[in-house]
Structures are given as C-alpha cells and as structure tokens.
Amino acid sequence: MAYSAPLTHHHDGTLCPADHKHTNSGKPLHPDCPGRASTQAICSCGRWEMKESGKGYVNKSRKRHLASHTQGPKVLRDLLRLDGS
C-alpha cells in the first residue's frame, strides 16, 4: 500500500487555500492571505502527524516518515527469505 502525507498550510487556525502563495518565510503573496502560520502533514497510515511553523522541517520529517514505510516490507522480506542468502 502506498502511503501519503500531503503538506497543508494554515493561517492562525484556518486552512490556507492552495491558491494562496507565500514567500519562503511565509509572507503572503495573495492580497487576502494573512500569511502562513504553520505547515501540517498527516500520514494516511494514521500513526504520524506533524504541525510546525517551519515548512522545511515538516517536509523533511514527512519524507523521512514516508521512507520508513518502504523500508519495513524489505526488512521482512529479507528475514523471511527461504534461500538463506
């Protein structure tokens, strides 16, 4: 099963629409946007989520978590090999 953990951006307590673009520091480029206060990622596995002010930190943690899903089955396959190699 392929897991996903999409990034979502938030104002102070509300979801920031996808058409609201920001600078790297979170300042708004859309006239109706108060700016990005936080970024959130929730994995579809249901066991991981993160919400922080740093978009880059959330994205790196998200990628690390998603990579852990791909490593799990490989470890099991290696342990259950019948040929012993």
Image: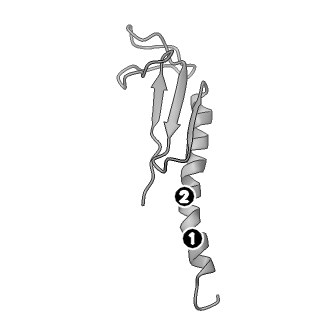
The alpha-carbon separation of the residues under discs 1 and 2 comes to 10 Å
Task: Name the residue located 53 percent from the left edge and 28 percent from the top edge.
Answer: 39
Task: Name the residue located 56 percent from the left edge and 44 percent from the top edge.
Answer: 48
Outermost residue toward the top? 31
Residue where numbered disc 2 is placed = 69
Q: Quick one: label 1 or label 2, which is nearer the N terminus? A: 2
Q: Position of residue 32 (x, y in %)?
A: 38, 8
Rendered view: 40 above or below 1: above
**How crowded is the residue under tag 2: few (<14 C-alpha within 10 Å), some, or many (20+)?**
some
Numbered badge on residue 10: none
Numbered badge on residue 74: 1
Outermost residue toward the front? 46
Rendered view: 53 above or below 47: above
Q: Are marks 1 and 2 in contact (CB under 8 Å)?
A: no
Q: Position of residue 60 (x, y in %)?
A: 60, 41
Rendered view: 17 above or below 50: above
Residue type at the position of mark 1: Lys
Q: How many marks?
A: 2
Label 1: element kind: helix
Q: Position of residue 49 (x, y in %)?
A: 55, 39
Label 2: element kind: helix
- The residue closer to the viewer here, 49 or 63, is 49
Task: Name the residue located 49 percent from the left edge and 18 percent from the top edge.
Answer: 13
Task: Name the residue located 61 percent from the left edge and 27 percent from the top edge.
Answer: 54
Outermost residue toward the bottom? 83
Outermost residue toward the left? 19
Q: Is residue 23 left or right of residue 33?
A: right
Residue type at the position of mark 2: His
Q: Hey, which quadrant is residue 15 in on the image?
A: top left
Rendered view: 14 above or below 44: above
